[in-house]
Amino acid sequence: MSTSPAPAPYVEPWLRGTHGDVLAVGRAVLHAFDLALDDLTKWAQGLTDAEVHAEPLGLTAISYHLKHIARSTDRLLSYAEGRQITAEQLAAMKGEPGGEETLAELLAEVEAAFSDAAERVRVLATADFNTFRGVGRKQLPTSIGGALIHVADHTQRHVGQVVTTAKVLRALRI
């Protein structure tokens, strides 16, 4: 009888030695995106499309969080780049609640957003992180570094909501 080797232990992205060509702040943002994809894939696996749109116990639907992660990443990086959000980005933001996308479509949107974001982060990682950036119509003050750190933090917050909601959905199946 042959035995399979034990699966390799999980190594978090920041310990994988990846993105070494990017300065530390940008690398940390890229690792946050990698970790987000790992967690979203793991915790969304096995959920039905109906479950992804459900609001168990009043929790916000996973579908909203997935769309918001992808689209807010784009918006926050626009601010980091010194631009305001476009009419298209604003329309996409208004379309975050609701919808009938499949889990596969939602995860693909996140992956595409992170792929695009990675190139933008690589460019921003070479900038002076203290350079002023204004956010929104009121031009609330931040910096390139502040916007980069926030996009990583914001992503992880919403990933946490996905994980929590997925756990509740699984518990309700029992």
Image (spheres, rainbow, N blue to C red):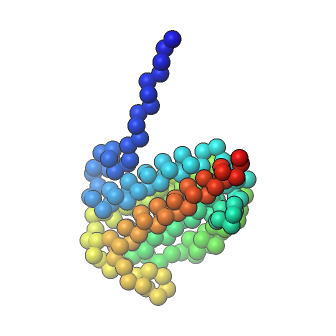
x then y, percent, for residue 10: 41, 41
* Residue at 27%, 59% in the rendered image: 24
* Residue at 48%, 82% in the rendered image: 136
x then y, percent, for residue 2: 49, 14
* Residue at 46%, 70% in the rendered image: 76
Side of 53 relative to 163 (left or right): right
x then y, percent, for residue 145: 32, 71
**Looking at the picture, does residue 105 appear above or below residue 79?**
above
Q: Residue furthest bottom?
A: 138
Residue 142 image-quadrant placement = bottom left
- Given residues 79 and 6, the one toward you in this image is 6
Residue 26 image-quadrant placement = bottom left
* Residue at 38%, 47% in the rendered image: 12
Task: Say if residue 135 shows up in the picture.
Answer: yes
**Looking at the picture, does residue 36 appear above or below residue 71?**
above
- Given residues 5 and 89, the one toward you in this image is 5
Q: Residue furthest top?
A: 1
Task: Say if residue 74 shows up in the picture.
Answer: no
Side of 32 relative to 110 (left or right): left
x then y, percent, for residue 21: 27, 51
